[in-house]
Amino acid sequence: MSDTARVFIGFDVDPQGLVDAPHRLAGQWATSVVESRLLEKLRMAAGATYSVSCSLTAGSLDLAVANRRPLVTIDFACEPTAAERCVSITLDEIRALADGVSPVTAEER
């Protein structure tokens, strides 16, 4: 059995962006779009990962406790030699989506 690198990337989320159910639902939808794109980019196109997961944890919006804050996490398993390249692809894809360079398509809606 070959070695596997497990990569976790986390982003803090502004709690004000998750103030009500529609905003939390939109956040969940956005993580689903990112997960689908990363699956396509990392697994299907690059053949570099075994799995990809992206999720939003709302934390506790009423508590000002650092470890209970909203968080987006992305994790994947890949060959150790592909880890840095996969992180780079992941960050590029998130930037492209956030900056509107690669907006959400009709198929992703």
Image: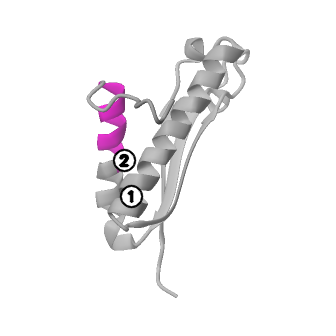
Can residue 6 be seen?
no
Residue 83 locus on image (x, y percent): 36, 63
| Residue 26 occupies quadrant | top right
- The residue located at (31%, 59%) in the rendering is 84
Q: Position of residue 37 (x, y in %)?
A: 42, 45
Above-or-below relation of 54 to 11? below
Q: Tell me whether circle 2 and circle 1 mark residues in contact (CB < 8 Å).
A: yes
Does label 2 or label 1 sit earlier along the sequence? Answer: 1
Q: Nearer the viewer, mark 2 or mark 1?
A: 1
Q: Which quadrant of the view contains residue 22?
A: top right
Boundaries of the magenta span? 90-99
Q: Of 14 and 96, which appears nearest the observer?
A: 96
Q: Is residue 67 above or below residue 15?
A: below
Q: Amino acid at mark 2?
A: Thr
Farthest residue to the front: give it: 106
Q: Which mark is residue 42?
A: 1
Helix, strand or loop for disc 2? helix
Residue 36 horizontal/vertical position (percent): 49, 46
Q: Residue furthest left?
A: 101
Amino acid type at image mark 1 = Leu
Q: Which residue is mark 2?
A: 90
